[in-house]
Amino acid sequence: MTSPAAYDDNNIFAKILRGEIPSHRVYEDEHTIAFMDVMPQAPGHVLVLPKAPSRNLLDADPATLTHAITVVQKVANAVKDVFDADGVFIAQFNEPAAGQTVFHLHFHVIPRHEGVALKPHSGKMEDGAVLAANAEKIRAALG
């Protein structure tokens, strides 16, 4: 078994956390941020990530996970309401073999509608105006 790779503080989410890359944020507190996925698999697709550096769930501090999943729940309830979804898909990948492509712990929160397929995640980037409008709706729901 190979040992896990070290955290890379130049990953895209670390850059977003530092404000080097813009994002459409919907929630932020001392420990966590949530922002719109730029390649949404459905309207309202949000990413929730802790500010603390960890590659994924396997090396994260348990306290970090506790706070992050609480925010995931809060965001999931908001997107379900805002997008009148039938359900909410929560996804979290650990290491390349499991589909992880950005090596900073993050959770996908995706509103789902019965009978509507998810778009591929590797598709084209969503228009910024659409992301901004969706972010505003979610922020309003979160109060």
Image (tube, rainbow, N blue to C red):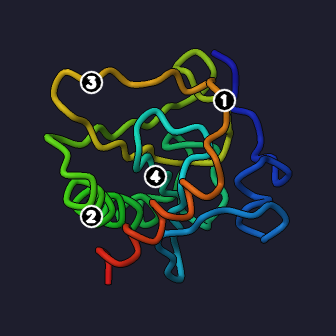
SS at mark 4 in the image: strand
C-alpha distance separating marks 1 and 4: 16 Å
Q: Residues within 10 Å of mark 4 (few under 14, many from 20)?
A: many
Closer to viewer: mark 2 or mark 1: 1
Amino acid type indicated by mark 3: Val
Amino acid type indicated by mark 4: Val
Sequence-earlier tag: 2 or 3 = 2
C-alpha distance separating marks 2 and 1: 25 Å
Q: Residues within 10 Å of mark 3 (few under 14, many from 20)?
A: few
Marks 3 and 4 in Cβ contact (< 8 Å): no
Q: Residues within 10 Å of mark 2 (few under 14, many from 20)?
A: many
> Residue 46, labelled with which disc?
4
Residue, x 55% and y 27% (percent of image)? 121
Sequence-earlier tag: 1 or 3 = 3
Of the 4 image quadrants, the one containing the C terminus is bottom left
Image quadrant in which you'd find residue 99: top right
